[in-house]
């Protein structure tokens, strides 16, 4: 054995394998070490944490409260004895990760100074005359103790070195060298248990060389600190030539060993062996493709092995490289096939602690698309202990927590229709669709949605629910709760809202329909026992049109019929209309008019600008646009006159006929959707399921095939605008 290795081994044995700080290669882990190993009450101990966490806190008195902060701290213990110290590492994020490690530090009492004795005066004695006496013989000195024997040659350039001394004795057919101290044999350090010994039995010619102990812990010196434990218990090694027979190692760092070769003792003072390891059962319990090579000595390569495949519940793992990190920790690099609805293959890291799966984590930039969703960034962690997961749903077999950035839908006004940057949770179930829910900063066509919840399912459904608060200064404000679904390059949704018309300081209930084209707020106007829904529509990026339109209204048409009197205008309405709207523009301000029906009905618009509702009429003025609008419930068939009052000059009169309420009835049984639709000119009815287009209604009756499970929604469009959404019940 070379002198440098002997010195390192002797030092290792002398300090009894002092704990050291864990390698920082492992993410989301924390360990710590301290110096001196056994501080006294009169000196400060320096404690160092090994972790990637940005936030590290210390508890020195086991009371649950933090006493210091930082990766490196100093602390002086006030009393002697064992002190339990806990270090807590925290990684911030939408789903924060917290790891703790607790160790016991032995603190010694202050060293007692040895008192110096006071010198006593030695009396001077006057020699007296000595009489002649017979000579006295002097006893022979005791023999010197034998020198300390630290090295026992084992042959082939191999030695057994000890930090203490070997005592030599003769036993039948061999010479035995015994020590209570640690022994190093080519990088294997044998530390006897209290009251036990390590015996090296060197045989007479023709015999076998044995290394024995009734109780010992075997360590492997190499590139990791602290050195891993290979074996604890009785030991019987037979060293035959350069091979160690009877070598035992059932696990390394908690990872189970399936098969093991006998170590080879090499002339350079190191040793080498191979071992096949078994992954934890939660990772599939696979065995390494090829045995891992394990070498001793300083500068030894890392211990690693590879597997082609492994698995976690709900996840497929491939191209695994498993590395021993330190103590009872292993680190794994792998390709991770994520479950739907993400469905990506990413590079991930796993940690195995004490032979059990501990955590899976990944942080990657992406450019992948999943239906209407474009994932831009994804980072996540999967905990072995479900109780530690901040996003686990009841009954889920797999839960992922993390952060993501995504966009969805078409590009509108130069930006994605939907963008999200925040945290997410993904839950995978045995019998239910997998569900990803995300929260954070969500924008719809540039407008921030409050309290938004984004959802993706493995069925293809993509949607977002939120509180809606959008408006146009001086015109209108929409407040409510919305639900939007994405379908390829399109999206649609609805919201139960209150629409406040700021130009007249008046609020109405409304059902807002949201689509790729824009927003239509269908106002609820209570006309006697009849609710009617004219709308206010706005295309994305444009100012809202104050004309009532869409919803329960057909398109407007200009009606400059021949006046019955100077300045009068007239509108002809057919029979059977559920309602109608007449829009009148004046030359200066919202005109005041009288509306006269074919049966003598008469309604005069008030002089002020407040909206007015009667049993049959609702009037609303928009002074900024010189517009007066009148809604009529179930108007009489015939000609309606618009008579200007107070000298008003009319520049335009438009009318829009009310539409019958859409009617869509359907049943879904055994994969077949049967529907009945009330036909209305300009109406198109499309059926969707989980964000997928099933087809459109052809005629008043028909059927469609439905393969998947999930809620079916009928989208009713009128003249190219979304008018209604009808959920089909099974």
Image (cartoon, rainbow, N blue to C red):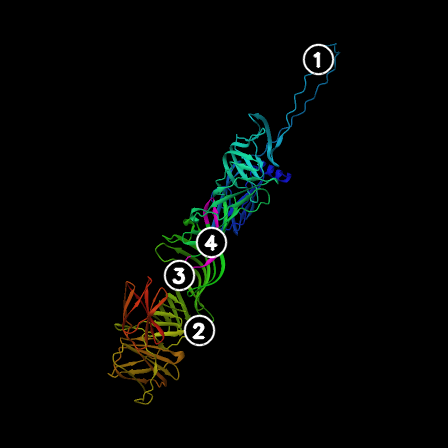
Mark 3 to mark 4 CA distance (whole Å): 28 Å
Position of the N terminus, as image quadrant, is top right
Precedes in sequence: disc 2 or disc 4: 4
Task: Please name which of the two marks, 3 or 4, marks the residue nearer to the observer.
Answer: 4
In x, y percent, where is residue 682?
Answer: 32, 77
Above or below 10: residue 422: below
Q: Residues within 10 Å of mark 1 (few under 14, many from 20)?
A: few
Q: Are marks 3 and 1 in contact (CB under 8 Å)?
A: no
Precedes in sequence: disc 3 or disc 4: 4
Residue 541: mark: 2
Position of the C terminus, as image quadrant, is bottom left
Residue 212 within the magenta-colored segment of the rendering? no
Mark 2 to mark 3 CA distance (whole Å): 26 Å
Main secondary structure type of the part rendered in magenta: strand
Mark 3 to mark 1 CA distance (whole Å): 108 Å
Q: Which residues are magenta?
A: 339-358
Precedes in sequence: disc 2 or disc 3: 3
113 relative position to 245: left or right? right
Q: Residue tagged by mark 3?
A: 455
253 or 171, which lies in front? 171
562 or 132, which lies in front? 132
Precedes in sequence: disc 1 or disc 2: 1
Mark 1 to mark 4 CA distance (whole Å): 91 Å
Task: Please name which of the two marks, 1 or 4, marks the residue nearer to the observer.
Answer: 4
466 or 208, which lies in front? 208
Secondary structure beneath label 3:
strand
Above or below 312: residue 119: above
Secondary structure beneath label 2:
loop
Task: Please name which of the two marks, 2 or 4, marks the residue nearer to the observer.
Answer: 4
Q: Residue tagged by mark 1?
A: 136
In x, y percent, where is residue 66?
Answer: 50, 46
In x, y percent, where is residue 491?
Answer: 39, 68
């Amino acid at each position: 054995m070379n002198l440098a290795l002997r010195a390192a081994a002797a030092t290792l044995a002398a300090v009894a394998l002092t704990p050291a700080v864990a390698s920082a290669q492992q993410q989301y882990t924390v360990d710590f070490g301290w110096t001196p190993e056994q501080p006294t009450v009169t000196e400060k101990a320096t404690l160092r944490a090994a972790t990637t966490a940005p936030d590290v806190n210390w508890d020195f008195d086991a009371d649950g409260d933090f006493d210091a902060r930082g990766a490196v701290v100093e602390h002086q213990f006030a009393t002697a004895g064992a002190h339990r110290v806990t270090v807590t590492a925290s990684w911030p994020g939408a789903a924060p990760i917290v790891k703790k490690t607790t160790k016991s530090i032995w603190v010694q009492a202050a060293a007692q100074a040895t008192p110096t004795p006071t010198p006593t005066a030695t009396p001077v004695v006057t020699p007296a005359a000595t009489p002649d006496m017979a000579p006295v013989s002097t006893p022979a000195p005791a023999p010197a103790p034998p020198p300390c024997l630290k090295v026992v040659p084992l042959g082939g350039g191999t030695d057994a070195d000890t930090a203490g001394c070997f005592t030599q004795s003769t036993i039948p057919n061999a010479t035995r060298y015994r020590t209570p101290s640690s022994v190093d044999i080519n990088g294997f350090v044998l530390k006897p248990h209290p009251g036990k010994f390590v015996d090296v039995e060197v045989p007479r010619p023709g015999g076998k060389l044995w290394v024995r102990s009734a109780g010992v812990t075997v360590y492997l010196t190499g590139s990791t600190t602290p050195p891993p434990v290979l074996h604890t218990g009785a030991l019987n090694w037979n060293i035959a030539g350069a091979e160690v027979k009877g070598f035992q190692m059932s696990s390394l760092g908690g990872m189970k060993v399936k098969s093991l070769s006998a170590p080879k003792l090499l002339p350079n003072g190191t040793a080498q062996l191979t071992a096949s390891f078994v992954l934890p059962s939660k990772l599939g319990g696979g065995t390494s493709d090829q045995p891992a090579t394990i070498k001793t000595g300083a500068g030894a390569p890392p211990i690693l092995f590879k597997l082609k495949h492994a698995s976690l519940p709900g996840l497929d793992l491939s191209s695994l490289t498993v590395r021993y990190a330190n103590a009872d920790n292993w680190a794994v690099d792998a390709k991770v096939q994520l479950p739907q609805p993400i469905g990506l293959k990413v590079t991930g890291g796993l940690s195995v602690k004490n032979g059990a799966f501990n955590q899976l984590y990944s942080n990657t930039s992406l450019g992948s698309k999943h239906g209407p969703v474009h994932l831009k960034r994804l980072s996540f962690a999967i905990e072995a202990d479900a109780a530690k997961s901040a996003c686990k749903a009841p009954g889920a077999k797999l839960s992922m927590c993390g952060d993501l950035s995504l966009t969805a839908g078409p590009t509108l006004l130069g930006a994605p229709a939907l963008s999200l940057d925040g945290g997410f949770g993904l839950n995978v179930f045995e019998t239910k669709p997998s569900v990803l829910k995300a929260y954070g900063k969500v924008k719809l066509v540039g407008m921030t949605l409050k309290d938004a919840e984004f959802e993706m399912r493995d069925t293809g459904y993509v949607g977002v629910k939120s509180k809606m608060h959008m408006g146009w200064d001086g015109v209108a404000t929409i407040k409510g709760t919305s639900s939007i679904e994405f379908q390829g390059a399109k999206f649609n949704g609805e919201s139960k809202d209150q629409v406040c018309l700021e130009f007249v300081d008046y609020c109405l209930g409304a059902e807002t329909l949201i689509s790729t084209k824009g927003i239509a707020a269908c106002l609820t106007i209570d006309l006697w026992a009849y609710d009617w829904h004219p709308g206010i529509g706005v295309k994305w990026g444009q100012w809202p049109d104050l004309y009532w339109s869409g919803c329960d209204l057909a398109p407007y048409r200009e009606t400059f019929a021949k006046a019955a009197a100077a300045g009068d205008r007239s509108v002809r309405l057919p029979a059977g209309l559920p309602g109608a709207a007449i829009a009148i523009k004046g030359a200066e301000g919202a005109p005041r008019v009288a509306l006269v029906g074919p049966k003598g009905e008469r309604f005069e618009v008030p002089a002020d600008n407040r909206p007015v509702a009667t049993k049959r009429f609702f009037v609303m003025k928009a002074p900024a646009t010189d517009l007066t609008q009148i809604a009529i419930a179930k108007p009489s068939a015939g000609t309606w006159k618009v008579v200007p009052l107070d000298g008003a000059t009319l520049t335009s009169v438009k009318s829009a006929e009310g539409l019958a309420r859409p009617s869509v009835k359907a049943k879904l049984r055994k994969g077949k959707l049967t529907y009945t639709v009330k036909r209305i000119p300009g109406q198109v009815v499309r059926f969707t399921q989980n964000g997928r287009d099933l087809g459109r209604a052809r005629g008043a009756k028909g059927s469609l095939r439905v393969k998947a499970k999930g809620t079916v929604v009928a989208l009713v469009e009128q003249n190219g605008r979304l008018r209604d959404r009808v959920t089909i019940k099974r």
